[in-house]
Amino acid sequence: MKRIASLSLDLDNQWSYMKTHGDAGWETFPSYLDVVVPRTLRFLKERDLTITFFIVGQDAALEKNRDAIASIAAAGHEIGNHSFSHEPWLHLYSKTELVEEFDKTEKALVEVTGKRPVGFRGPGYSLSGTVLEVLAERGYEYDCSTLPTYIAPLARAYYFFKSPEMTDEEREKRKKLFGKLSDGFQTLKPHFIEVAGKGLVEIPVTTFPVVKTPIHLSYLIYLSTFSAGIAMMYWKTALATCRASGVQPSLLLHPLDFLSGDDISELKFFPGMNMPATRKLTLVSEFLRVYTDSFSVVTMREHADSFKNGVATESHTAAVLL
């Protein structure tokens, strides 16, 4: 019997990439959702995959994006909370600001999709004790904002290098973007976080066990620009190491995994955006085929429920033995 693994997509929009990058013009909220959402839904349907989409509240609040977002829920996918303003410095928010942020996001998502989210991922893996406290108080079942990797400072330095026009103030807000070096010591396995008198399930974004290098699809596509063979070998080895170490992986997708610079020229500076979309889709298909061959792929909520049920079963067994 296959072990389970989860699959999710952070539906970061064009404006949110521009905002994080410090580009002018993001305030008009340019969007590519009308292109990427139908393409992604068609791709998933062809492969009989149901996943979790973490959606930004600001996008759900804009009329121009509502049809695209509503179609995600209509296709049966889980809807998760990816904040309202998509600011990777969410850890700097006060509790009052966080409550307002969550309230606006939930209202927008319920209005468009009819579904209230029970899971959260912070933009840029932004997380704090206060964020977890607000999640627990609002009845969330799981969080998946941690990225256990040692290379976060390198990724952040590269991002700043590619953003020369960013002001010192903007850089200060982003100084914890992608996390910190010590995040590499965090576990890759789901676990409970006790907060506000409740047990919140934390499901980390999976990295390569032991070495903790990234294995999300954007990274695999980037490796493929040098050698598709090496990227696939790296991917298969990572999954084999997950199985050997008892890690049930949680794989992360992004919209840019389904787009090219021809679709959105403003984001050509991102790694892999010079690759034609048809080539990207072929690569994503091959990577996901290996994933589904190796694991039974479920939504984030199903992953969290499986973990909770497993803990409950272990506790019951221990109680019987005693």
Image: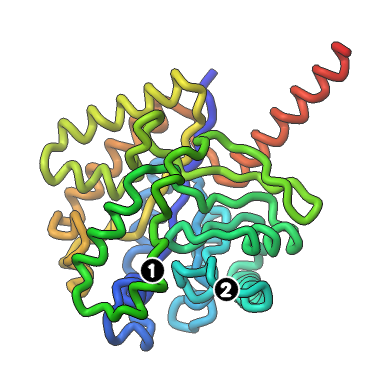
- Left or right, 276 with respect to 211, comes to left
Instruction: Give the residue drawn at x 42%, y 54%.
Output: 179
Quick one: quadrant of the C terminus? top right
Residue 32 seen by the camera? no
Choose top left, top right, bottom left or bottom right for residue 163.
Answer: bottom left
- Left or right, 24 with respect to 251, comes to left
Indicate the secondary structure of the residue bearing disc 1. loop
> Can you give x and y, in whole percent of width and height, for residue 302 in the image?
62, 41
**Residue bearing mark 1:** 174
> Can you give x and y, in whole percent of width and height, for residue 205 in the image?
46, 44
> Can you give x and y, in whole percent of width and height, for residue 164 in the image?
19, 74
Q: Residue furthest top?
A: 321
Viewer-proximal residue, 241 or 285? 241
Neighbourhood count class around disc 1 (C-alpha, 10 Å): few under 14, some 14–19, many 20 upward: many
Viewer-proximal residue, 307 or 45? 307
- Left or right, 13 with respect to 247, comes to left
